[in-house]
Structures are given as structure tokens and as C-alpha cells.
Image: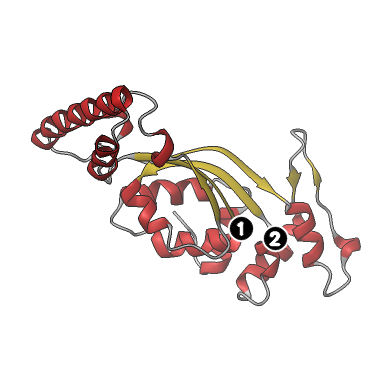
Amino acid sequence: MLKTERVSVMNLENAMRGARNPMNSWARSDSARDESGAWALGPSDLDLALRLCASGSDHRKFIRQIFVSMDITAPMYWWKEFDTYKVGTVANSTSTMHKLHARPIELADFSTDHMTPASLTEFQRYVGYLETVRRRYTAGKNKADWYDLIQLLPASYNQMRTVTFNYEVMANIYFARRDHKLDEWHTLCAALLELPYARQMLEAIGGAAIE
């Protein structure tokens, strides 16, 4: 399971102005804010953006100045893979260390969408035991119970992080992970394609249409 929320794209206007700096072609810019207040690329600016994207990483430097912020909720086993992307990303996570015991532990706190019925039945018992340990800790504040809770927590536990990255990182993620065996990556890649002009830019970078 993976969910994206509160998605924002920033600095597109400034990034495109910078893309025109090398040729002093600012007068050709035809972008403006649309009715919603978002920065919309005009035909001339979009054509330039896509040509630069297609020309290689040295020429598409402007996409490193287009920033994305989103909240991602995903299981810990997926976050371990996402942590590969350390350059150009920042993430603030909810804390299992400080807040795991703050509310009841429920089945909905975990990604169980691919469990077989037999495994799900066993896992429900396991979650029940985790909740027993949590209650024991909140009642007595015994450090041994706290360690039990932390060390028993499975990798399917869902954590929310507020993540920021730029469009170059977005492209790296998309092309590296779009065919990954984990469905969570497919969900994120689909969300990335919905970012403003992301599909067009990724098609220009990859040299082929994205279905």
C-alpha cells in the first residue's frame, strides 16, 4: 500500500526563466498563471523545456530547480528502498520511537493488501499481541515492554513522511522503478506522471511515449 497526499509543485516559473538565461531569450517566454493561479507553460516555453530534456542531463539543468513536496504513506519495507535516494531529497517522518505507543495499534496501521487469507489471520493475532504489549507499556512505562514493541514491529507498518525532491530526482525514480516488483513503486510512478508537465518531460528524457 502506498498513498500520496498534499502534493505541491513549486518554482516552475523561476526554473523556466533560468532555462532561457544561456541564450538571453526571455522575451520569447509565453507562460503565465492560469485561472487557478498555477504557472502554466506556453507553447514556446514548453517546446524549449522538452528540447532541453531530450538533450541530456547537462542541458536539462532547469528541472533540478522544479521542486516537489508530498506526503507519502507507505510500509517500512518500501521506505528502506526509497532511502536509496539520499541526494536531492529531504524527508521528515512520523516517529515510531516517540509515538508508536500513543494510540491503539490496529490492523489498518499495516500494509496487508497482498497477504494470503491464512497469513492475514495469523497477522491479526500478532497485531493483537502488539496492542497488548503497547497497553502494558503505557500502564507501567517498563523499558523492556518498550523494547518489545519496537523490536516486534513488522516491516509492513505504515509510516507517513513529508518528502521533497526535484524533477531530476523524479525522473531518476521513475525510470529506475517503473518496472519494479513492488506495487508501491508502480503507485508512486503513476502519481509522478500526474505532476505538471512530468509526463511530457519524462517522454522527452526517455525518447518514447509513456503508456
Callout 2 crowding tier (Cα within 10 Å): few <14, some 14–19, many ≥20: many
Furthest residue to the right?
A: 27
Residue for point 61% across, 74% down: 57
Residue 172 lies, with reference to residue 11, above or below; the image says below
Count of numbered circles on the image? 2
What residue is disc 1 on?
A: 166
Occupied quadrant, residue 202? bottom right
- Name the amino acid type tagged 2: Gln
Residue for point 32% across, 29% down: 141
Question: Where, quadrant-wise, is the N terminus in this rendering?
Answer: top left
- Determine if residue 83 is in view: yes
Dot 2 lies on which element? helix
| 70 or 193: nearer the viewer | 70
- Mark number, residue 177: none
| 202 or 83: nearer the viewer | 83
Are the residues flagged by discs 2 and 1 in contact, CB closer than 8 Å?
A: yes
Callout 1 crowding tier (Cα within 10 Å): few <14, some 14–19, many ≥20: some
Relative image position of residue 119 (x, y in whole percent): 12, 37
Distance of label 2 from label 1 (alpha carbons) = 7 Å
- Determine if residue 44 is in view: no
* Of the image marks 2 and 1, the number of the one nearer the N terminus: 2
- Mark number, residue 65: 2
Residue 129 lies, with reference to residue 90, above or below; the image says above
Residue for point 66% across, 70% down: 60
| 150 or 11: nearer the viewer | 150
- Name the amino acid type tagged 1: Asn
Relative image position of residue 17 (x, y in whole percent): 82, 61
Relative image position of residue 180 (x, y in whole percent): 33, 58
Relative image position of residue 63 (x, y in whole percent): 66, 62
